[in-house]
Amino acid sequence: MRRTSRRFGYLLFLMAGSFSFLSFAQGPGGGNEFAIRDIHQQLVSAPQYASMIEGQGTTGASFQKKWLRVETTFDSTPEWADDVTLKYYVLMGKGRETKLFTGEATYVNVARGTRHVSALFINPNTVERYGQGRVETVAVELLYKGRLIDRASEPPTQTRWWERYTPVPGYLVPPHQTPWSLMAYQRYEQLKPSP
């Protein structure tokens, strides 16, 4: 009888461990259709198309300023998916000057596969004014049809630090509103058309 109780207890322990592992593997939303691989934020110079056009001469000082590009790579398992939304949170500044810039991009026709790329950008003047050229931290949440599936932060953290700040929307813009618009269709997923 005692041996049977031990086996039963051990079986329950294994089942609980397996359930915990599956819950962790499926992410915060409890689904595993999508997974964020990584977030990469970088200050980058705009492509200089003017130099490709004959007779344009030298470029202005604005071309020497750096944009903030925040790219997220993610994987997907559905054959096709619409309404895949990535919400971005970018923290800049210190103390009273701290700003939490927010933005989101919703994609359609996302095929099954790995290393899909999403990106949002912040204008150089915003980066210079509020972050003095520096980003404190970045986070991204991935939602599928409105349901939270995964989240990640760079640098990595378990806390949802972005919930402590007042969001400032409108400063994070998609590639088609930047100098990268001509190249965006080759690198980034298809944005959902505006109504």
Image: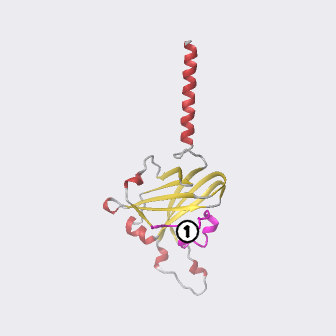
Magenta span has 187? yes
- The residue at 54%/31% (across/down) is 16
Q: Is 99 left or right of 146, judged from the image as shown?
A: left
Name the image quarter holding residue 52. bottom right
Q: Residues within 10 Å of mark 1 (few under 14, many from 20)?
A: many
Helix, strand or loop under label 1 = helix
Residue 63: x percent and y percent?
A: 49, 76
Quick one: quadrant of the C terminus?
bottom right
Q: Which residues are magenta?
A: 170-195
The image's colouring method is: secondary structure
Amino acid on which the number 1 mark rests in the picture: Pro
Judging depth in this view, the residue of 154 and 108 nearest the camera is 108
From the image, which quarter does the N terminus lie in? top right
Residue positioned 57% across, 14% down in the render: 3
Q: 115 or 10: which is nearer to us?
A: 10
Residue 59 position within the rendered picture, expressed as x and y whole percent measured from the top left? 51, 81
* Main secondary structure along the magenta-highlighted residues: loop
Q: Residue at x 57, y 33 (%)?
A: 18
Expressed as whole percent of the image width and height from the top left, the position of residue 149 reads 54, 49
Verify whether residue 50 appears in magenta.
no
Q: How many marks?
A: 1
Judging by the rendered image, the residue that carries numbered circle 1 is 175
Above/below status of 4 relative to 154: above
Q: Position of residue 116 (x, y in %)?
A: 61, 57
Which residue sits furthest top?
A: 1
Above or below 37: residue 189:
below
